[in-house]
Amino acid sequence: MSTVSEPSEERAVPFGVSDLPPRRRPFKLRLHTAFRWLHIYISMISMLIIFFFAITGVTLNHPEWIPAESETIIDESGSLPADWNAGGEVNWLTIVEHLRAEHGIRGNLFDYRVDDFEGFVAFKSPGYAADAFFDPSTGEYQVTIVSQGFLGVLNQLHRGTEAQGPWRVAIDVAGALLAVLSLTGIGLLLYLRKFRVSALITMAAGSVLAVVLMMMAT
C-alpha cells in the first residue's frame, strides 16, 4: 500500500531576491561610493556660499569696478549729554547710546579711547563705518558716516574682518567644505583609469603654477 507524502512547506521568496546571504561589497567600491556621495551632496549644500566667495574674490581684486556714486559720506556734529563724564569718568555706554540714537549709527563698536585732547569712538560693519571725535573739555563732537553700497558690503563679507560671529563661522565652514570637495574630487579621479594619468599631470602642473604665482607676488 503506497503512502502519499505531504508536500514540504516552502518559504516564498520575492522575485529577484536571492535566498543566499548578500556578499559584502569590496572596500574599494565602498570608498568610491562614499567619495561620490560626499562630493555630490556637499556641492549642492555649499553651492551658493562657494559661488559667493568666488565672485567676491574677483570684485575684491578689482575695486575700480565699484561705482564712485555707490559710496555715501555723511558729516554731522552735536554735543554729548551732560552725564557723559559724570564723576570725572568717561561713560562710554552713554556716549555710544547717544550717538546711535541721534545719528542712526549701526554696526559693532570697533574702538574707543580718550586722552587730554581728544576722544574717539568707531563703529564698523561690512561696508559701513562711523567715526566720532569729541572734545573732552566741551563734549562737542564730529561724526563721519561712510556707507559703501551693496557691492562694498559683499566685499567686506568676503573678508569677514568686520562681520558678526555667525558669519565668521560660516566662512570657516565654507573653507572646510571647499577642502572636502577638493579631496573627494581627487579621490573620484583615482577611479577613472582612462583619464587618471593625464588628470594627475594637469593637477600637478596647476599646483606648480599656483606656487610660482604666489612666490612672484611676495
Image (spheres, rainbow, N blue to C red):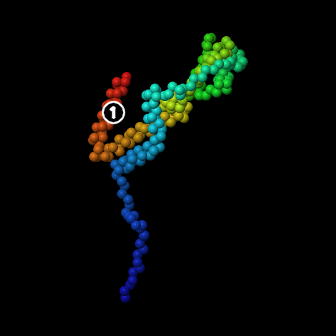
Closer-to-camera residue (90/154): 154
Q: What residue sits 37% from the left and 24% below the top?
A: 217
Residue 110 visible? no
User: As drawn, is 149 to the left or to the right of 213?
Assistant: right
Q: Quadrant of the C terminus?
A: top left
Q: Position of residue 127 (x, y in %)?
A: 54, 28
Instruction: Report the quarter where the N terminus lies.
Output: bottom left
| Figure label count | 1
Point out residue 75 in the picture as x, y percentages from the top left corner: 61, 20
Above or below, comparing residue 160 to residue 186 in the picture: above
Q: Mark 1 sits on what residue?
A: 207
Q: Secondary structure at mark 1?
A: helix
Residue depicted at 43% across the width and 38% down the height: 178
Image x and y of residue 59, in percent: 45, 30
User: Position of 133 compared to 15: left or right?
Assistant: right
Q: Is residue 186 left or right of residue 163?
A: left
Neighbour tally class for label 1: few under 14, some 14-19, many 20 plus, Cα within 10 Å: few
Residue 155 falls left or right of residue 113: left
Q: Position of residue 43 (x, y in %)?
A: 43, 43
* Viewer-nearest residue: 45 or 28: 45
Evaluate whether residue 154 shows in this view. Answer: yes
Quarter occupied by residue 118: top right
Q: Give the residue type at disc 1.
A: Ser
